[in-house]
Amino acid sequence: MKKYVNVIVIALAVAAGFTFYSLVLGNPANFADAAKEEPINALGMIYTGGILVGLLVSFIILAVVYSIERFLSINKAKGKSDPVKFIKRVTSKLEADDLDGALDECDKQRGSVANVLRAAISRYKAVEKDDNFGPEKKISEVQRSIDEALNLETPLLEKNLVIISTIASIATMVGLMGTTLGMIRAFRALANSGTVSATQLSIGISEALYNTAGGLIAAVICIVAYNFFTSKVDSFVYMIDEAILNITSIFTIKTKK
């Protein structure tokens, strides 16, 4: 079921976007005529942007939804308390040779940092007194456990960032397509009538401009979110690497005693 979550979210967002376009923006109360060609307020004017407005609304909804999801997920990955203080507590426990205490700290903290450190500490505890493992082999086993844990945790931190960046690109293209279609409609109305039809010309221009605006809004939200969360993930991974270096150094010293 989990592999279909993004498909379901995208489908719901598209449905919500076109529902908003049809029922809210296309509400007859927003127009002075039954043909919905003479808007009397901002909602009606946006509706004249055409069917692509519904798709752009969907992109904006997706941008907001995935931004919120990434914010909550990254905060959850930090664990229940400040990860910096947590790392210091674990380091202190390890320096005092209290492996069980360090593991308890990891169980209380949870999150990505705690999961990686717990994997390393658990593996070291398992091989610490095993005579079949030399000092270098013990550290190698710990490093292997760390690598396995990182391979599980890192994709979770970067999850859906590709979708956010993809939405930014597609929204821009859809907005440009709407702009092009709107200008075609405006010039077609001008060519067919032979004279300037204010209504048809304004509809075509509205379609062009509102699609441009919608595409830019969605793209800006996604670009800002992508850069923000990429920076957060990079900082978080750096913190994990620093914590790994600290505990690996502690284990190296202990194995040489």
Image: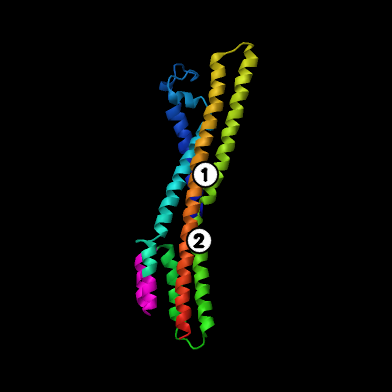
> Is the residue 163 above or below the residue 150 in the image?
above
- Which quarter of the figure is the C terminus placed in? bottom left
Assign a secondary structure to mark 1: helix
Q: Does the magenta segment cover residue 182?
A: no
Image quarter of residue 40: top left
Q: CA separation, marks 1 and 2? A: 21 Å
Residue 169 drawn at (x, y percent) = 57, 42
Instruction: Judge from the rendering whether residue 251 lies leftward or rightward of residue 105; answer left or right.
Output: right
Image quarter of residue 84: bottom left
Badge 1 or badge 2: first in the primary sequence: 2
The magenta region covers: 89-110
**Disc number for residue 154:** 2
Assign a secondary structure to mark 2: helix
Q: Does the magenta segment cover residue 97?
A: yes
**Residue sticking out furthest to the top:** 195
Give the residue at mark 1.
223
Which residue lies at the image location 51% right of the left edge and 48% below the top edge?
A: 227
Count the marks: 2
> Is the residue 151 above or below the residue 184 in the image?
below
Which residue lies at the image location 48% right of the left edge and 74% below the top edge?
A: 248
Which residue lies at the image location 36% right of the left edge and 77% below the top edge?
A: 100
Mark 1 residue crowding within 10 angstroms, few (<14) / some (14–19) / many (20+): some
Q: Amino acid at mark 1?
A: Ile
Residue 211 drawn at (x, y percent) = 54, 30
